[in-house]
Image: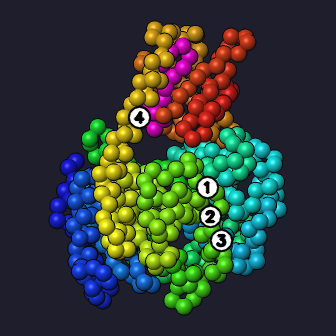
Amino acid sequence: MKIKLLILAILFVTVNPNFAQRKGSSLTQQDTLNNINSFILSMMTEWKIPAASITIVKDGKPYYSSAYGIKNTAKNLPATVNTLFPIASCTKSFTAMALGILADEKKLDWNKPIKEYMPDFQLFDDTATNTLTARDILSHRTGLPRHDFVWLFNNNDRESIFKNMKYLKPSKNLYAQYQYNNLMYNVAGVLVERLSGKTWENFVREKILIPLEMKSTVLTYSEMFKNPDYATSYKIENELVSEAGFGSNVDAIGSAGSVKSNGIDMTNWLLVQLQNGQFKGKQIISEKNLKENHTPIQVVYPTEAKYPELGFGSYGMGWIMNVYRGNQRRQHNGSIEGFRSQMTVFPNNNLGIFITTNTGAADYNFVNIITNYISDNLLIMSQIDWNSRLKKDRDDAKFEEEKKKKEYNANRKMGAMMSHPIDYYAGVYEHPAYGTLQIFKTDRGLRAVYHNRQIELSHFHYDFFEGTGFLEDVTFNFVTNLKGDIDKIIATFPNAGEVDFKRK
C-alpha cells in the first residue's frame, strides 16, 4: 500500500505564543518551527514513515506539539497530537519513578537486596539472587542476557515469567557488563506490586499518571483499543507495507514496556523530569529519588562513541546519560511491534523532546535524526547532517550483515544429510521458561510450532536447521544421545545464547 504523506503536515499544533527573536540568531521562534516542520516532512518521506508525533518542552513550558501523517492507512485516518502510540521501553522510566516514589514512602531501600522484600525471588545464580538490589535490576548489570522469547509472542503472565527466571542462565558474571534486560524490569514491576499492595498498573496510574494529568495515557492494549484515536503499527517486507499487529504480549511484562501515550501527555512527563520531580507546584517524586533515577550506574556496552559530538552512554535507572555536543543529555528509546519512540531531556538547557512513530522500517534512524535536528536548532548550534551519517551507518551495517551471512554460509556442508529419518525429529520439546517447541513432519520437511505460531525449519546441514518467520534469527541443532536417539534441541536465540529444549 502506497502511503501518502504529502501535505498532511501540521494537523494540530500548540506553540508558546512568545515569538521573541533567539539570542545570537536572526531566526524567530516561528521561523525555527517552520524549519523543523519542513525537515520532519522531508524525512518522513525519505524514511517512509506513515505517522509521527512530536512534542517539545522548553524553559519550563510546553513549546510545541504536532502530529504528522497517517495513523491508519487502511482507513486513511490522520494522526493527531491525541493519537495514542505504544512507547515501549520508554516505560522503564515510569517504573524507575514508581520505585523512587516507594523509596520516598520508606518502603524501599535502593541498596537493600530485593530478596529481602521478595523471598520467592530466585535466579539461576544464587549469588545474584541474594545480592541484587532495586538499583541493580534497573541498571542492566545482573549478568542475565535478554531472553526475550520467554515473554515475546507468548501468553505467559507476569507471575509465571517472574517465577521461571530461575531457569535462565546468565551469560556474564554479576556486574561484569551492561546487558539490556526486559525481564529484570518485569521483576521491578513485581517489586512495585509487593511493596505497594497494588498492581503495577494501578500504582503507576494513581501515583504518576493522575497527578501528572496524563489523562489519555493507558497501560494495556485493551484500554488503548477503547480509544478510537490510536495508531496502527506497520512493517515493510520486500518493499510492501503491512500491519505489524499487536501480538507481542508486552502487557504481561508491563513495567518493561506497556505504556501507551501521546504527544500532549508526554509533555507533562518531560516537564516533571526537568522540574526536579515537581508538576504544577506539586512534588510527584522527591528531588533526591528522581536524581537517583538520573545518576549513572553502569557504562553502556560497547563503550564507544562513533562521532566526536557524542559521549559514550551510561545507564542510570530507566534513563541513559550521555553528552551531545557538550550538553548533558538523558535519553531512552522504545521499540515494540512496528513502533519506535524516543524521549530526550537536556537538564542544563531546560529542553525536552519526545518523538514517536508507527513503523519499525527505519529502526531508530528517523527518531534520532529528528531529535538531533531539533536539538541543534533549539540549542542554537550549527546543523549536522545526521541524515547522511545515519543512512551511511545503515548501509554499512547492511553490508556487514551480508558479509557475515556469506561467511556463515561458507561453513555449510552442501549435501550433508540428516543423521536420522525425518520422522525421528518430530516430537515435543520443552524448556521450563521458554515453553514448548513442537516439531512436525510435513511434505516440505520439518515445521515448528512455538508460542502458537507455525514456522518452517530450513535444513542447513546434518541435524542443524534455521528458523524462518518470527524465528528467522534462531538456529536449531537436534542432538543425539548415546543411545542414538534425538533427545533435545539446542536453540540459539539472539541476545540469549543456547537454550536446551528437552524431548518429552
Q: Would you call the spot at circle 1 few (<14 residues within 10 Å), some (14-19), or many (20 or more)?
A: some
Q: CA distance from mark 3 to mark 4?
A: 39 Å
Q: Quadrant of the C terminus?
A: top right
Please say if the residues under marks 4 and 2 sit with CB atoms less than 8 Å apart.
no
Local secondary structure at mark 1: strand
Task: Report the span colored magenta.
Answer: 460-472
Mark toward the viewer: 3 or 2? 2
Q: Is residue 64 above or below residue 424?
A: below
- Is 240 magenta? The answer is no
Please say if the residues under marks 2 and 1 sit with CB atoms less than 8 Å apart.
yes
Residue at image x 63%, y 81%? Answer: 287
Residue where numbered disc 1 is placed: 299
Residue where numbered disc 4 is placed: 400
Q: Would you call the spot at circle 3 few (<14 residues within 10 Å), some (14-19), or many (20 or more)?
A: some
Mark toward the viewer: 1 or 3? 1
Q: Is residue 177 above or below residue 397?
A: below
Q: Quadrant of residue 478?
A: top right
Label located before the other in sequence (1 or 3): 3
Residue at image x 82%, y 54%? Answer: 130
Colour option used = rainbow
Residue at image x 32%, y 83%? Answer: 23
Q: CA distance from mark 3 to mark 2?
A: 9 Å
Q: CA distance from mark 1 to mark 3?
A: 16 Å
Label located before the other in sequence (4 or 2): 2
Q: Residue 301: percent from the left, percent from the top? A: 58, 49
Q: Is residue 336 above or below residue 259?
A: above
Residue where numbered disc 3 is placed: 292
Q: Residue 252: percent from the left, percent from the top? A: 58, 55
